[in-house]
Image (spheres, rainbow, N blue to C red):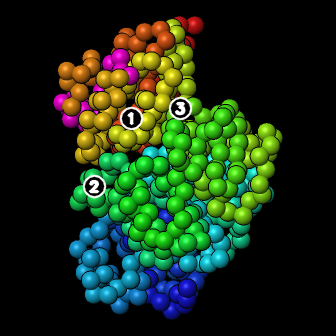
Amino acid sequence: MDLAGQKVLTIGLGRSGVAAARLCLEKGARVTATDAAPRERLSKEAIALEAAGVTLATGGHPTSLFDGIDLVVISPGVPSFPALEAFEKAGGEVIGELELAARFFAGTPIALIGGTNGKSTTTALVHAMLEAAGKKVFIGGNFGTPLAEVVGQSFDAIVLEISSFQAERVPTLHARAHALLNITDDHLDRYPSFEAYADAKGNPFVNMGPADTAVIPHGDALCAKQAARGGARVVTFSATDEAATVRPVGGSIVHRDARHSFPLDALQIAGKHNVENACAALGVVAAFDVPFDDSADSWLSRAVRAFRGLGHRTVLVGVIDGVRYYDDSKGTNVGASVAALRGLTEDKAVLIAGGKDKLGAYEPLVEALRQKGRALVLIGEAADRIEAAARGSIAIARASSMVEAVRVARRFAKPGDAVLLSPACSSFDMFRDYKDRGDQFAQAVQSMLEVRS
C-alpha cells in the first residue's frame, strides 16, 4: 500500500487511532487526526502526534476536514456520522485501523476470532497453541495491541480478536482462519438491528476461499449463514454434538479431520463454554502449518495445560462460609452472562448484574436465573429494565455500590452456592472499565474475608 504524498484523515484518537496516524505518517502520508473530544481530554500519545507532523483537529468532525482527503481511517469506537457518510457516498475510501495495518502484512497468515462472547479467551488460547508449535506469533486487535503498532515486524502468524466495530470496514482483510464463536444481542445501541450487527460480525468471511477455514459452532444457523458469505471450508465445534468436526471424544478434545487432539483434563479453565472455546481454538490452529502430535505430552497438550485463562472471566476471588465468589466482570452482554451462569459447577448462584444498558433483551438471562439463580442483585442504570424482565421469577434486591452489592449477595447465598459478578452490561455508568468493576468486586470480597479473620 503506497501512502506517500496521500492526504489521510484518521478519525478517533484512542490507541488504535494514534497507531493508525503514526503508521500513515511513517509511510509518507500527510495526516490530519481528529477526535470528538476537546484537546485537554486527549492522551499524551495523541498530543505527541502534533510534534511528529500530524495536524490535530479536536472537538468534532466538521465536513471541511474531508476536503481533498484521499483516504479516511476510522477507529472502531467511532460510530458513523453524516459527514463521513457523505464522503463515502461520493466515492471516498474509508477503512478501519485493522484493514489499514493488514495491508502491510501480505503473505502473513492471519487468524481472526470473533463472536459476541468468548473471543478473548479463545484468542489467547490460539496464541498459546501456535507459540507452543514453535511459531513467532503476534496477538492483538481488540485483544489489546493495535496491529498498526507492529507494522514492519516479521511474524509467522497473526492472531487477532476482532469486534463487530473492527469488522465494519475491512474490504480486503483476508484470514487464513476465522472463528465466529456465537452471535447474541449486543451493541444494539449502535446498530439499527440485530441483523446489521450479525452482518458486521460476518464481514471477514467474505474474502475467504477454499484454502481458508471458517470455524463455527455446530448447528448454529446464524453463524452458518455468515460463513456462507465466503468460500471457506467450514469446520464446526461443539462441547456435546457428535457430528461436530472438533469435539470431546473419550476424554480428549479431537479434531476429526486434522487428527490433532489433547486430553480434556489438560484444560484448566472451567465451564462448558470454555470447552467450546477450546474446541474452537483447535479448529483455528489446525488451519495453520503445525506438526501433528497426539501424545499426552505433546506441544498442544502442554500449551493447553499451561493456559490459566484471563482476568475477570469467571475467576474465583474468594470463599466465605462455603460460598464461592466469582469475578466475571468481562460479562458485558446478556449472552456472556448466561454462559457464565450456566457454566458454574455450583447448583445455585446469586447474580450481581447491571450497568450501562446496551438495549438488548434480558429474557435469556431470566431463563438462566430460573434454572440456576438463588437471587439477583442489581446495580447501575440498567437495573430498572432487568428488574422488569425478572420480576416474579427470582428474589431481587438493589445496591448503590459494589460493596453494598457484595454484602447483599452474601445475605442471600447459602453454603455450596456461588456469588457471580456477571453484569450483562457495560461498566461506564459507575466504573472506569470492566477491570475496575471486577477489581472493586474482588476488593469487596477480600474486605469481608479480612473482617472474618
> Left of 40 or right of it: where is 448?
right
Picture coordinates of residue 214, whole percent (x, y): 52, 61
Q: Residue at x 66, y 34 (%)?
A: 250
Q: Which mark is residue 266?
A: none
Which quadrant holds the C terminus? top right
User: Tag 1 or tag 3, which sits nearer the N-term?
Assistant: 3
Q: Is 6 placed above or below 129 here?
A: below
Where disc 1 sits, the SS reads helix
Name the mark on residue 338: 1
| Mark 1 surroundings: few (<14), some (14-19) or many (≥20) residues within 10 A | many
- Is residue 281 visible to us here? no
Kind of residue sitting beneath label 1: Val
Is 347 colored magenta in this rendering? Answer: no
Q: Dot 2: within a 10 Å radius of its alpha carbon, few (fewer than 14), some, or many (20 or more) residues?
A: some
The label number, if any, that marks residue 194 in the structure image: 2
Which one is in front, 225 or 153? 225
| Vertical relation: 179 (above or below) 103 | above
Residue identifier under label 3: 271
Residue 60 can be seen in this image: yes
Question: Cα distance, mark 2 to mark 1?
Answer: 18 Å
